[in-house]
């Protein structure tokens, strides 16, 4: 190798190494500065692009890329992709109503599906509600007519769609449901701790990163529509006419698409696509579909994942503003 070429290679490698060090520091500074990051306790974070992981880190020693955990509503994005794959990207308006949580099936209590006798997707859908003073009357399959057409965040929409014949999931139990999902989405480490499509998945950050890269690379039909899907208003500021129930804070003007969130800022500009879970697992894809990110942890449900959203947003911003092209 010519001397000048060697020097060029060495300088390039040094520059890359220096950039990575500066980027890691910028993200670490963002984590330290964000009070919600401090409140998370231990967590693993990762950012990557279409080719693979770019940078990652961990607070504490509890979590790594291969730590299996319950991901709660991050399961929804997986089911949305499964539906699109099953239907080859051709959904009816009714099928989109289920994915966009406007179907009127809003009566699901997760507790009813956690009982030992509930084994299949269909049994979970038909399960009678227990603890009625807390969760109301009827079953998970109860259609609430006054909610039809309105956004109402509830797991029953997914379960009602899953039991339809075209989905092929009604008689699946935890094991066979996981197998169907892995086969359709070409993923490896997926299991279900109860047969509920909207929140039953257990997996790890490494597996979910493969899923996000597949979306970025348009390997799924859902990935091809990620940026073109307008979704529906899903924040309470839209008023009860359109939004009956939403888990997002009032200051987050988010919309909802085909079983994932469209994160908009107050100017209406899309910042990311995501599917945060109540235990704090927070996966996202940047609005330009160049990058994905994950915060992986399994915390208390009472936090509703909001601290992970805040912390993950700070990490994303630190990463993006420190890119060479920015």
Image (cartoon, rainbow, N blue to C red):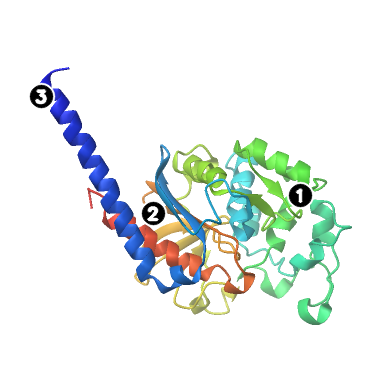
Disc 1 packing (10 Å; few <14; some 14–19; many ≥20):
few
Q: Quadrant of residue 116?
A: bottom right
Q: Give residue 4's mark.
A: 3
Where is residue 171 drawn, in percent x and y?
A: 83, 46
Distance from the alpha carbon under mark 3 to that under mark 1: 66 Å
- Between 50 and 139, the one lying in front of the other is 50
Point out the tag, 2 or 3, that comes first from the N-terminus.
Answer: 3
Where is residue 153 drawn, in percent x and y?
A: 62, 68
Helix, strand or loop at mark 2: loop
Which mark lies nearer to you, 2 or 3? 3
Task: Please give the residue where the numbered disc 2 appears in the rendered image.
Answer: 287
Say which residue appears at 51% left-offset and 59% top-offset.
Answer: 43
Distance from the alpha carbon under mark 2 to that under mark 3: 40 Å
Tell me: 325 left or right of 40.
left
Cβ atoms at labels 3 and 1 below 8 Å apart = no
Q: Residue furthest right?
A: 117
Where is residue 164 drawn, in percent x and y?
A: 76, 49
Say which residue appears at 69% left-offset and 63% top-offset.
Answer: 155
Point out the tag, 2 or 1, that comes first from the N-terminus.
Answer: 1
Q: Give residue 164's mark.
A: 1
Disc 3 packing (10 Å; few <14; some 14–19; many ≥20):
few
- Between 320 and 61, the one lying in front of the other is 61
Helix, strand or loop at mark 3: helix
Position of the N terminus, as image quadrant, is: top left
Tell me: 211 left or right of 149.
left
Q: Residue furthest left?
A: 4
Which mark lies nearer to you, 3 or 1? 3
């Amino acid at each position: 190798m010519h001397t000048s070429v060697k020097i060029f290679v060495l300088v390039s490698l040094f520059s890359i190494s220096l950039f990575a060090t500066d980027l890691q520091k910028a993200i670490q500074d963002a984590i330290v500065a964000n009070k919600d990051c401090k409140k998370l306790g231990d967590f693993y974070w990762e950012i990557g692009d279409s080719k693979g992981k770019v940078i990652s880190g961990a607070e504490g020693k509890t979590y790594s890329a291969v730590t299996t955990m319950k991901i709660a509503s991050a399961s929804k994005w997986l089911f949305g992709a499964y539906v699109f794959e099953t239907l080859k990207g051709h959904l009816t308006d009714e099928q989109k109503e289920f994915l966009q949580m406007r179907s009127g099936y809003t009566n699901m209590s997760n507790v009813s599906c956690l009982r030992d006798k509930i084994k299949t997707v269909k049994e979970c859908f038909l399960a009678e509600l227990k603890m009625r003073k807390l969760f109301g009357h009827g079953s998970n399959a109860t259609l609430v007519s006054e909610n039809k057409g309105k956004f109402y965040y509830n797991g029953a929409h997914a379960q009602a769609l899953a039991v339809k014949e075209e989905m092929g999931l009604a008689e699946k139990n935890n094991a066979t449901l996981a197998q169907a999902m892995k086969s359709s989405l070409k993923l490896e480490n997926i299991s279900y701790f109860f047969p509920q499509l909207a929140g039953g998945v257990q997996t790890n950050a490494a597996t979910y990163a493969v899923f996000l890269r597949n979306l970025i690379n348009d390997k799924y039909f859902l990935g091809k529509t990620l940026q073109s899907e307008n979704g529906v208003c899903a924040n309470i500021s839209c008023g009860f006419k359109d939004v009956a129930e939403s888990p997002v804070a009032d200051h987050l003007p988010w919309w909802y698409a085909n079983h994932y969130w469209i994160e908009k800022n107050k100017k209406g500009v899309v910042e990311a696509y995501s599917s945060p879970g109540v235990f704090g697992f927070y996966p996202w894809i940047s609005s330009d579909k160049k990058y994905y990110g994950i915060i992986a942890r399994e915390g208390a449900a009472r936090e509703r994942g909001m601290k992970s959203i805040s912390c993950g947003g700070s990490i994303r911003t630190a990463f993006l503003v420190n890119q060479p092209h920015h």
